Amino acid sequence: MNKTLPLIKDVAGLAKFMKSSSKSFDLVLDKLQLVSFGNGKCVAELKVDESHTNSMGRLHGSLSTTLVDTLSSFALMSKVEGPHVSVDIHMSYLKDATVGDEIVVEARVVKSGKKMAFLEVDIVDKASKELLVKGSHTKFIL
């Protein structure tokens, strides 16, 4: 197992990493469309389909958490080389999305030091620009 993560510099590099990662969340991430990446930021879009919803037909909270975890980690990978692990993820669910809605996931590094990184993610409705989910993620840099 490779214990170091590369410093990724562009969308093409991130797409290559996502395809080569044997432990990625393929069912979630294969439908993501990367919009921009670099300098501590990662933006992607996703059209919500049945596989993304809970029993009530709404965007599933665990999927939102996976998006926060994954996209904020990608944002960090554009700034920090080497492995990092989650310490804390906090989610605020403000509004739901349903099948057919298009969402934008905007992840950014707020601050990274030698051992800790603080990340934020907004999940917004693409059409209305309304904030659906707010996530914060703290990572320990190994």
Image: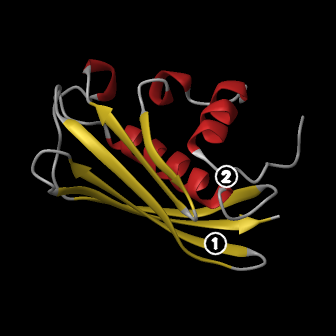
Residue type, mark 2 in image = Lys
- Say whether marks 1 and 2 touch (CB < 8 Å): no
Q: Is residue 27 above or below residue 4?
A: above
Q: Which residue is mark 2?
A: 9
Residue at the image point whose x is 45% and y is 58% from the top: 107
Residue 89 lies, with reference to residue 50, above or below; the image says below
Instruction: Report the label total.
Output: 2
Question: For residue 60, which quarter of the picture?
Answer: top left
From the viewer's perspective, is 100 left or right of 32? left
Which badge, 1 or 2, comes first in the chain's sequence? 2
Please identify the quadrant where the N terminus is shown.
Answer: top right
Label of residue 117 in the image: 1
The dot on residue 15 is: none
The location of residue 105, given as percent across then percent down, is: 36, 49
Can you give x and y, in whole percent of width and height, for residue 15 in the image?
60, 33
Quarter of the image that includes the C terminus: bottom right
